[in-house]
Image: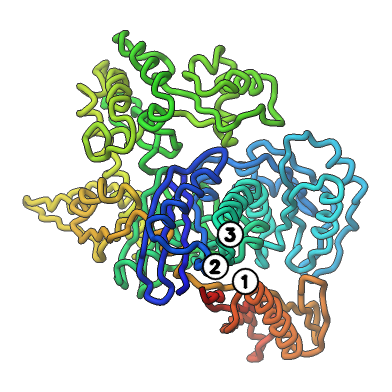
């Protein structure tokens, strides 16, 4: 007998499932809290619980597959390592395109002359001495490098030379833009490389944690990782290209949704601790975004499912809306629920909340807590960050104790952004505890925190709510409202309506959902069911389906759909390249190892396809695929000159696909 082990690591929970490879039956499923900074604790706890429940021999596990929302969450929340961008052959003004400046968040940029032309010819020689000097001048807080050179997809020589030099000088991870995409569009490629470099440490830590525990329990099986398009890649590929794991968790959940429900056409809504991910299931398969994965404000060049990701989850921060009317808004930042913080640090949390409640006026810090994700002082901190971090070395502190001056508030914010500190405060998870929908952590602490929050004043001078129960219901209602809005936007987009965001909140839309009856009668509903996934889906999504006047499908194992989807996918390795025509009767094939010239387009196209088949096939074989299926897509651009077609350029994409080898137990 052979068994499959699926693991999904999210912002709040790590899930594990054991499946029988022959029958596709789910034998066991388990959850554990995702542990920070040591991810191995949560990964190990989930795997151990699932193995114990299944009562199988760990040595009989034939394949392990991992999906994660860590990369997605990090980009939504603006977290990740500090990187340096090497920008070769571009005008500095191009940093303002494609959201690149925002993505850099003040990280250093090394601008150099160089790069190549559209035809692959060198424009200006690369000054490696200047690059070496600039790299040596960087501060020690830089954790990785991103390199983007002009037209590197036509000739990658300058990116490769810069990569080799930086690796020799620093030993730190380096990402080249041409390794992530063969498409043109330098600033967008640079953005994708920056985000990849920012994520390398995080994803490497997760894979290492998983590999270490598998070895510990005696599992000697191939480890695969789910890519953003739902395909499986080897752990080594995921380490080098962690950007490809953005939307990994959501992609796995789509596969899991299809497998669990048998639905062909539906909107899938997966609620986690940090985000809600919505995707259209069409004919039993997820749609792929032709423009590249979009996560938060960033549009990348990563091929992934067409997913709408919103910073809304069970652990979203709760905000009071400014103005006379008040009201609430959830997200996009994630907090640690107070009820969870109290479970682990009961004396601190209850003592602080009791003191705050003794005063009728809520304190400036709202009774929130700073939770360190480190056990020793991190590197690369400035003076104020160091002061705050030093106070947290002994463990969690009330925010007003961790930050003693107003000038230190931005320092704490930076520590949170870099994933070194989490803030514990009121979340929908706490509201669910107060209302009795969930009983996982410290309900009494949740009630105290919501009592304190309810005492805040809105613009009219009134309190936010009359008490913790009323506030909890307001929070759950707001979560329902924002989820409905997200699903409506996705639905309007899929139907190609212009202005989906405005339409989702339009008074006529709201009237239709409410089935308004008057001189005008308005009805509106979704034309497909919604599949609700996530550990908290059962607690929240009944009201969502009722509001949208559609069937809500809440399958068994909905809470571990990601882990199930992780083991039912296939390997799909892509390789792509281009053929250009620098002049009449000349055709250039742009390959990773250089440019080759041909006198006929047929020779050029065939040579490119052979090379790409070899590249994709080798990658699939390395991932464990024995029976490889190839598909080839050719996109040829021509113009008509006096009735005769004239070749401009062509792109070829080869996909090598198949199931990874499953060993006999």
Q: Residues within 10 Å of mark 1 (few under 14, many from 20)?
A: many
Q: Residue at x 55, y 12 (%)?
A: 404
In this view, the residue farthest toward the top is 359
Q: Secondary structure at mark 2?
A: strand
Instruction: Return the mark for residue 548.
Output: none
Residue 623 marker = 1
Across and down, in percent, residue 414 comes to: 59, 30
Give me the residue at 36% from left, 57% from top.
490
* Left or right of 82, for residue 541: left
- Of the residues under marks 1 and 3, which one precedes in the sequence? 3
Closer to the N terminus: mark 1 or mark 2?
Answer: 2
Query: Is 658 on the left or on the right of 640, as rendered?
Result: left
Left or right: where 466 falls relative to 409? left
Cα distance, mark 2 to mark 3?
A: 11 Å
Position of residue 89 measured from the top left corner of the image (x, y, whole percent): 80, 54
Helix, strand or loop status at disc 3? helix
């Amino acid at each position: 007998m052979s068994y499959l082990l699926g693991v999904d690591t999210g912002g709040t929970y790590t899930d594990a499932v054991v499946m029988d490879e022959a029958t596709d039956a789910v034998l066991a499923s388990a959850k554990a809290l995702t542990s920070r900074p040591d991810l191995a604790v949560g990964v190990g706890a989930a795997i151990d619980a699932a193995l114990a429940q299944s009562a199988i021999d760990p040595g009989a596990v034939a394949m392990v597959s991992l999906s994660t929302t860590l990369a997605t969450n990090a980009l939504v929340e603006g977290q990740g390592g500090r990187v340096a961008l090497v920008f070769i052959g571009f005008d500095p003004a191009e940093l303002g395109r494609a959201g690149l400046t925002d993505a850099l968040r003040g990280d250093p940029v090394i601008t150099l002359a160089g790069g190549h032309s559209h035809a692959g010819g060198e424009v200006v020689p690369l000054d490696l001495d200047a690059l070496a000097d600039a790299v040596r001048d960087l501060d020690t807080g830089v954790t990785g490098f991103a390199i983007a050179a002009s037209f590197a997809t036509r000739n990658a020589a300058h990116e490769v030379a810069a990569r080799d030099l930086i690796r020799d000088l620093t030993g730190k991870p380096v990402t080249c833009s041409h390794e992530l995409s063969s498409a043109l569009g330098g600033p967008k490629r640079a953005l994708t490389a920056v985000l990849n470099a920012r994520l390398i440490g995080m994803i490497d830590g997760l894979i290492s944690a998983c590999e270490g525990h598998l070895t510990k329990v005696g599992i000697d099986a191939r480890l695969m990782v789910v890519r953003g398009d739902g395909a499986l890649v080897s752990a080594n590929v995921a380490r080098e290209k962690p950007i490809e794991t953005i939307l990994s968790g959501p992609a796995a959940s789509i596969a899991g949704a299809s497998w669990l429900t048998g639905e062909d056409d539906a909107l899938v809504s997966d609620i986690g601790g940090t985000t809600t991910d919505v995707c259209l299931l069409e004919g039993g398969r997820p749609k792929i975004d032709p423009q590249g994965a979009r996560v938060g404000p960033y549009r990348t060049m990563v091929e992934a499912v067409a997913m709408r990701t919103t910073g809304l989850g069970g652990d979203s921060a709760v905000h009071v809306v400014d103005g006379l009317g008040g009201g609430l808004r959830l997200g996009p930042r994630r907090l640690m629920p107070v009820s969870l913080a109290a479970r682990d640090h009961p004396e601190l949390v209850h003592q602080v909340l009791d003191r705050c409640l003794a005063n009728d006026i809520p304190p400036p810090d709202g009774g929130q807590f700073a939770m360190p994700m480190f056990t020793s002082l991190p590197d690369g901190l400035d003076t104020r960050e160091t002061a705050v971090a030093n106070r947290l070395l002994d463990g969690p502190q009330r925010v007003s104790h961790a930050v003693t001056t107003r000038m230190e508030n931005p320092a704490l914010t930076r520590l949170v952004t870099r994933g070194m500190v989490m803030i514990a405060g009121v979340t929908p998870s706490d509201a669910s505890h107060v209302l009795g929908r969930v009983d996982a952590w410290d309900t009494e602490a949740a009630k105290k925190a919501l009592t304190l929050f309810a005492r805040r004043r809105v613009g009219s001078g009134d309190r936010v709510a009359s008490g913790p129960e009323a506030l909890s219901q307001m929070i759950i209602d707001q979560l329902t409202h924002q989820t409905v809005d997200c699903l409506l936007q996705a639905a309007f987009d899929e139907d190609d309506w212009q202005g989906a965001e405005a339409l989702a909140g339009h008074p006529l839309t709201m009237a239709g959902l409410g089935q308004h009856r008057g001189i005008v009668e308005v009805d509106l509903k979704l034309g497909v069911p919604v599949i609700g996934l996530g550990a908290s889906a059962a607690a929240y999504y009944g009201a969502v389906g009722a509001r949208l006047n559609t069937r809500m499908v809440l399958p068994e194992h909905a809470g571990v759909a990601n882990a199930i989807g992780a083991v039912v996918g296939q390997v799909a390795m892509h390789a792509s390249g281009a053929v250009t025509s620098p002049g009449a009767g000349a055709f250039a094939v742009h390959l990773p190892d250089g440019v080759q010239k041909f006198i006929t387009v047929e020779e050029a196209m065939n040579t490119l396809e052979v090379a790409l088949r070899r590249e994709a096939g080798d990658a699939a074989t390395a991932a464990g695929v024995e029976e490889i299926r190839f598909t080839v897509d050719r996109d040829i651009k021509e113009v008509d000159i006096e009735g005769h077609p004239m070749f401009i350029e062509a792109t070829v994409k080869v996909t090598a696909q198949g199931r990874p080898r499953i060993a006999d137990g």
